[in-house]
Amino acid sequence: MKISWTLLGLTCGVFAVAGGCKDKKKTDAADGSTQSAGKPVVQPTTEPVGQLDPFARLSTDAGKALDRGWKATKAKKWEDAQQAFSEVVAASPDYVPARWALVRALVLGNNFAGVPLAFEGLLARDYVGYATKLDKPKELKALRDSAEWAKIEDLKTRYATAYLAGLDKGFFFVARTRTANEVKPGGGGEATLDLKQEIYHYADDTKRFRRLTDTDGHAFAIDLTRNRKQLTFLVAAKLKRDKNSDAFVDPKVGVIDLDALQTFGPYVQKGTYNEVALGQDAANLPLFTFTISGGEAKTYTLDTAKTGLALVGAGNDGGETRAQPGQVSHSTSRVLAGVKITDGANQFTLESEGQPAIPVVAARPLQASSIDWSPSKTRITYAGKLDACKILATANAKDKEKNELYVYEVAKKTAQRVAAGISGFESLWLDDDRLVYESGVGKDGQLHIYTFSTHADLALLTRHGAGLYGVPTLACEKADVADPNEAPSEEAPDSEGD
């Protein structure tokens, strides 16, 4: 299946509302602006896109109003439903289910004139989830046949463009939209995987969240191509369970084109797989590697028409996200320029041409994949190797082993501890001064933005669990697939691009 959000043509009927279609248009030669009867046409503005707090819980009063709205909807008392849902929207502007319920109540109550304004607030906050919701249901046909439909089409056009803007900045992550049960190995047969997860973008300049997938809560892992043009993702809804480990059953993979806000897939890969890796080749072509028990792996990409998966022989080039049912891990590269380390050692060296090597020593074994340069190589991250089996076997929470995230500053030749806790501390540099990092696991998984110049640590309000590449978890199981972080890395050339 190919899902795409395309820009729709503007209609004269929409601009007639603003007085823009009464006369033939002409262009002012001085500034190129469009005029009508000698007066410039005022172009419609858009609301800020995204949500400030998409994971917020409803207050008691808002929850009661929501219940009244559902009861009125069931009884087809549309005016009462509109009033109740309006109260929820006023109390919790980012609670989009209430906004959609309000739009639907307006339509079914034949209050078509009120639909565009209500629908605009919904599109601004969650375009991906609701842009096409009015297009097909038979019960909403009267709206599509009304004069207000032109306004709806115009809104979808404007917000498709607005929702796309800014995705080249900020960062992407996977988050649980509400409380979910953790995955625990064991048992037998097949089981539903229902983690209630979707993919989001966070704009650090506006501090707003944008949802990018609508997978019924089955989004599992993501990876971003180096050129930030495509976001690959894994959708998983079913597991095959045995005594020691789990495997994905018929996983799906897809690609989001971030230049056009188009989603290709997700396409199903029939079979049972212990691991699915999301990566790319040297030309940023998305790659999906499916590994079965025993280590046999096959790699696919999208066919040229983007209608399905095609088997390829090329291997991954650079960073990748590896997803197993119990955990998601990410490596930026198998070889990090200017860094020499053996995974599991408690130190690494920074090397550059003509300069003496700089040793960086930690008090515990290091996770090689945690080491990552800031954009201009002024700082570098490193974190310890987490022993999930040991942590899970420790009953007392106070006795559980904590991990630590450090950052070494090259100019000062000093290191500072950024965070400590039960976490693998996946991290991502926004720029040389700001680092995004994970803390916690499962429902306590959270994303932070640490600013070095001010020592400010902002924790994003993801209340049910979130992670940069997948929601972080603790899994004590012996997988049959190779760990990309176990092989010692080689000394890399100093030149950029190698």
Image (spheres, rainbow, N blue to C red):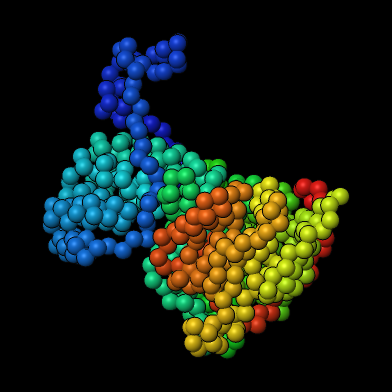
Kindly indicate the quadrant of the structure image that contains residue 485.
bottom right
Identify which residue is drawn at 33% across, 24% down: 42
> How many marks are shown on the rendered structure?
0
Placement of 198 over or under 189, stated as above or below: above
Residue 60, percent from left and from top: 21, 65
The answer to whether residue 93 is left or right of residue 206 is left
Identify which residue is drawn at 60% across, 53% down: 429
Kindly indicate the quadrant of the structure image that contains residue 268.
bottom right
Residue 219, percent from left and from top: 50, 64
Work out whether residue 250 or residue 319 is closer to the camera in this orientation and state it: 319
Residue 494 seen in render? yes
The answer to whether residue 122 is left or right of residue 31 is left
The answer to whether residue 352 is left or right of residue 207 is right
Q: Residue furthest right?
A: 354
Identify which residue is drawn at 54% across, 82% down: 400
The answer to whether residue 153 is left or right of residue 4 is left
Residue 462, percent from left and from top: 42, 62
Work out whether residue 96 or residue 91 is closer to the camera in this orientation and state it: 91
Residue 484 seen in render? no
Residue 133, percent from left and from top: 35, 51
Identify which residue is drawn at 16% across, 62% down: 68
